[in-house]
């Protein structure tokens, strides 16, 4: 019964994550509620071992329909990989609880900015070319990669927001690009968690199948309905993240 619950959560997480990120909002709480006696690092590692497959499938699906800027995303993914590895190492020695009260405040600022800028992310118009765009993308990858390895909630949504706000992508292209960096951060974190024995591989394999199924559904919805649809899903997911992280930080 426990495995059935987290498998259903993984399917829904894959669907949401493939569109705008935020799948951890669903799967991580489900894992903590189902296995309350497990070490946090083990549950984070098991989550990564499942979600990386859904994110990888989403990346392939997007790459077939969206023109990804690989000269920019390649170096940015490498930076995200390095950042995530060090973030995952830090979480094995330091409790990330101090971020809990800060996270909902940051997410609220992101949501309010998105709501007030009604044209934000509707048109794909990259603001930078060549080296400057690559450097900015690498900076985003390094910082958010570290955050993803260390704490995690909302990473995909932060990637999308910064690709829209800083680089000028529309929400669909930002979501597709974010998947490339998310794959890198997940692989990096998995390597660290696995080396320290913090992954339940059998559970992760079952969750991965469900996550892939959800990812295929979510990717098709995003490609079919475009940037406007992704924007509204982004708003809903960030709103849900604010409620969840705010409750955990101030009321729980």
Image: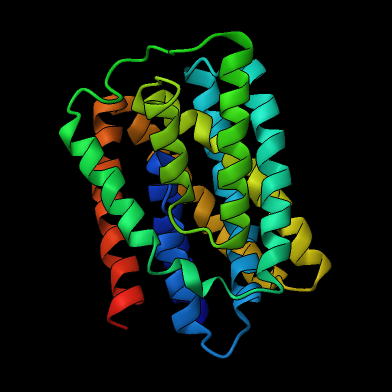
Where does residue 188 sit, x and y in percent of width and height? 72, 50
Where does residue 215 sit, x and y in percent of width and height? 47, 45
Left or right of residue 66: residue 113: left
Identity of the residue drawn at 30% across and 77% down: 250
Where does residue 44 sit, x and y in percent of width and height? 60, 68
Identity of the residue drawn at 61% across and 50% down: 52
Where does residue 227 sit, x and y in percent of width and height? 30, 25
- Vertical placement of residue 96 versus 60, above or below: below
Question: Residue 242, located in which quarter of the rendered image?
Answer: bottom left
Question: Residue 220, located in which quarter of the rendered image?
Answer: top left
Q: Residue furthest bottom?
A: 37
Left or right of residue 105: residue 50: right
Q: Residue furthest top?
A: 129
Would residue 217 be seen by someone viewing this image from the given angle? no
Q: Quadrant of the C terminus?
A: bottom left
Nearest the viewer among 26 and 73 is: 73
Identity of the residue drawn at 61% across and 61% down: 150
Question: Residue 167, located in which quarter of the rendered image?
Answer: top left
- For the image shown, how many numbered marks are present on the structure? 0
- Colouring used for the render: rainbow
Would residue 45 be seen by someone viewing this image from the given angle? yes
Identity of the residue drawn at 60% across and 34% down: 139
């Amino acid at each position: 019964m426990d495995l059935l619950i987290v498998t259903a959560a993984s399917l829904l997480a894959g669907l949401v994550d493939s569109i705008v990120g935020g799948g951890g909002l669903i799967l991580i709480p489900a894992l903590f509620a189902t296995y309350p006696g497990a070490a946090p690092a083990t549950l984070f590692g098991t989550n990564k071992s499942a979600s990386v497959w859904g994110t990888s499938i989403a990346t392939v699906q997007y790459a077939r329909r969206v023109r990804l800027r690989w000269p920019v995303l390649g170096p940015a993914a490498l930076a995200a990989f390095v950042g995530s590895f060090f973030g995952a190492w830090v979480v094995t020695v330091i409790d990330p609880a101090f971020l809990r009260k800060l996270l909902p405040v940051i997410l609220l600022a992101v949501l309010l900015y998105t709501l007030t800028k009604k044209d934000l992310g509707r048109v794909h118009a990259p603001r930078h070319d060549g080296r400057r765009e690559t450097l900015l993308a690498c900076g985003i990858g390094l910082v958010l990669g570290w955050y993803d390895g260390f704490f995690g909630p909302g990473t995909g949504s932060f990637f999308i927001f910064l690709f829209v706000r800083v680089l000028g992508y529309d929400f669909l292209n930002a979501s597709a690009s974010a998947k490339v960096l998310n794959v890198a951060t997940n692989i990096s974190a998995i390597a660290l968690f696995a080396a320290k024995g913090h992954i339940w591989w059998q559970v992760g394999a079952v969750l991965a199948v469900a996550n892939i199924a959800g990812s295929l559904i979510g990717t098709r919805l995003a490609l079919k309905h475009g940037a406007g649809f992704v924007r509204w899903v982004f708003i809903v997911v960030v709103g849900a993240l604010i409620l969840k992280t705010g409750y955990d930080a101030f009321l729980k």
